[in-house]
Amino acid sequence: MILVLKNLLSPEELASIRADLGPQAPWIDGASSAGGQAVTQKNNQQLAQDSALAIRLQQRVLQAVQTDPLFFSAALPRKIFNPLFNRYSGASNHYGPHIDGAVLHAKQTGERVRTDLSCTVFLNEPADYGGGELGIHDTYGTQNIKLPAGHAVLYPGTSLHEVRPVTRGQRLASFFWVQSMVRSDEQRRLLFELDMNLLQLRQQHGETPQTTALTGTYHNLLRMWADT
């Protein structure tokens, strides 16, 4: 399942983050954090994740996603890898097709996080740069995603994906991974669809015996599938 999360960050928050991510920020070669398969494909810059700036910005992104009800319903997060930040511009302008490592070590928390889901938060507007689409390859073909600033896309960590070359300007984003309480993408999708339909039924008809029964079904499925 590929899901767009809208307006996670306000215009004021975005302007502040972009100012912090200027030329003075501690940018490093993005390939320094890539795994064996991805290192040959990765050509971008990344904010040093143990820097004071990165730690401060991580908390802003985490606060935004953790208070978003759609994110919680879709991801059912158990662990979240500390958000990272990257920049594509000039000669450091793309990340070729790759699949992220199955388990990553977060320097900030010391935890190992299974990458059930990937999330990219776009930090500047599509008009600010040429190219730079996030290409996600799945069973239904390739989805090319380039979202307004403050929007995010959540997608399965098992997906082959890439960032297409940035031909003009610069592309700024935050990205992270989620270990879900429900490991199966199919089970998460079923739970999400049930939750969203229950929400619509309540909005249309209020609380009824049927919505109460279906809510019980949702929680019994979650109880069956969740690992906490």
Image: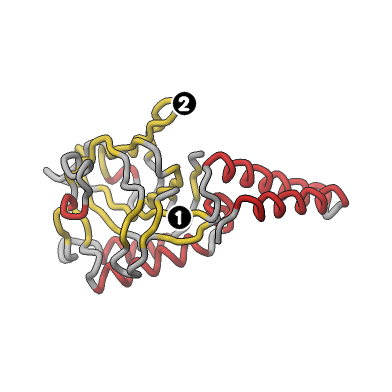
Q: Is residue 83 above or below residue 44?
A: below
Can you say which quadrant of the picture contains the C terminus? bottom right
Q: Residue furthest left?
A: 91
Q: Which residue is more in the foreground, 128 or 66? A: 66
At x 53%, y 64%, the residue is: 67
**Residue 93 makes an appearance in the image:** yes
Give the numbered dot on residue 179. Answer: 1
Of the pair 156 and 114, the residue shown nearer to us: 114
User: Is residue 132 or residue 178 the one in the foreground?
Assistant: 178
**Image coords of residue 2 (percent x, y):** 48, 40
Q: Percent x, y for residue 53? A: 26, 70
**Mark closer to the chain start, 2 or 1:** 2
- Residue position for label 2: 140
Which numbered dot is residue 83? none
Instruction: Decide: few, some or many residues near mark 2? Use Cα within 10 Å; few <14, some 14-19, many ≥20.
Output: few
Left or right of 10? Residue 54 is left
Secondary structure, mark 1, is strand
Image position of 209 (left or right of 32) = right
Q: How many marks?
A: 2
Mark 1, residues whose alpha carbon is within 10 Å: few (<14), some, or many (≥20)?
Answer: many
* Percent position of residue 85, x then y: 28, 57
Label 2 vs label 1: CA separation? 24 Å
- At 79% from the left and 47% from the top, the residue drawn is 204
Q: Helix, strand or loop at disc 2? A: loop
Is residue 149 at least partly visible in the picture?
no
Q: Is residue 130 left or right of residue 62?
A: left
